[in-house]
Image (cartoon, rainbow, N blue to C red):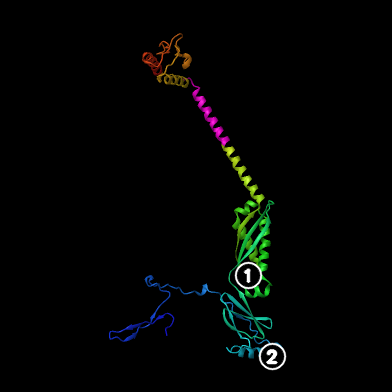
Amino acid sequence: MSDLGHDTLPSTSLNGDTATKKPAMVSSAVPRASGGGLVTVQPLKRSEMQPSYRQNLGLDTVQHGFYGSLINGIGAVAGFFGQLPFCFCCPNPYKEIEQGSVGLISRFGQFYRSEDPGLVKINACSETLRRVDVRVTTTPIGKQSVITRDSVSVMVDSVIFWHISNPYRASFGINDVRTALIERAQTTLRNVVGGRVLQSLVTEREQVALEIQEIVGDVADRWGVQVESILIKDIIFSQELQESLSSAAKQKRIGESKVIAAQAEVDAARLMRQAADILASKSAMQIRALESLQAMAKTANSKVIFVPMNLNHLSGDDNLPPGGTAPGANVPPTAVASGSGSGSRSDNMISTAALSQLADT
């Protein structure tokens, strides 16, 4: 035989005899080497286990008259024989309570004690056992048709997480705690969502759920129920509402694009106005005219270029002497009307040189 936490392994001595190795204590709290393939199991803490609900109100001595004493006696005798394995005609007085549940025992319909998970003994004739589940339960509230403050109809799907904190209140204080909790959550959901607009409902979903949880939790506490959380799973819009929201978003984007385009046109017009003011100056007009003449003179094709003898009108310079010309303006006008052959190359070069002289001035 080996106890839990002990390893007893046979060993062989030098003379061939089999000896028993001393049992080694194995502590689950000490990490084991991973090479051996063992899994470290941490001991379960008492705070992590189910809290104890065991309680006895001390009503064992309460008398129920002759009839009550008779029923108690019959139940005790029947339980004595019922606990025997081969006796099938008498009820077994021992009942099992599963982990995660609490047993509420009543005698002649009057509650007098509660038991924790395990094996408990009751009187089969005068006592009854009611098992109450104290685990966290997930209950869907269901899809609710709700009208928001801005008169928009939506479907809200939510779920509630709760557990029984007081088995006595949840069992004897209310008929059906699950149905009552769902109905209360549905009513609160309609009231809270009805006080908000659609935009607030969509963007502040967690705040809406917390507000519903606070209202439902205060009422559920009187029923022996603790509400862990309420979550809004989905908000469903109708087809007409979806099309309306999509159209509104599209129109908003179109409006924003028009505003951006108009702003761009205003900026472009402002820049063009600034450019026009700059180009309207006398010096800018002279530079542009000379650049145009240079560009035409650089090409090798046949061309006819008329260069004005007096550059007063071109440059806008009123300071030139009357009848005089600017430096380099005495270049005679050159008319080139020859082909692109070799005979016209020299004339073209003279015109280019003359224009270059004008540009240098």
Amino acid residing under circle 2: Leu
Height in image: 214 above or below 80?
Answer: above
- Res 225 label: 1
Q: Is residue 329 left or right of residue 251?
A: left
Spot occupied by residue 104 in the image (x, y as percentages of width and height): 63, 79
Spot occupied by residue 229 in the image (x, y as percentages of width and height): 59, 64
Q: Is residue 318 visible?
A: no
Numbered circles on residues, count: 2
Residue sitting nearer the eye, 240 or 69: 240
Q: Are marks 2 and 1 in contact (CB under 8 Å)?
A: no
Spot occupied by residue 283 in the image (x, y as percentages of width and height): 46, 20
Q: Is residue 195 magenta?
A: no
Disc 2 secondary structure class = helix
The quadrant holding residue 177 is bottom right
Look at 69% across and 90% down and name the residue there: 70
Magenta span: 261-282
Residue topped by disc 2: 70
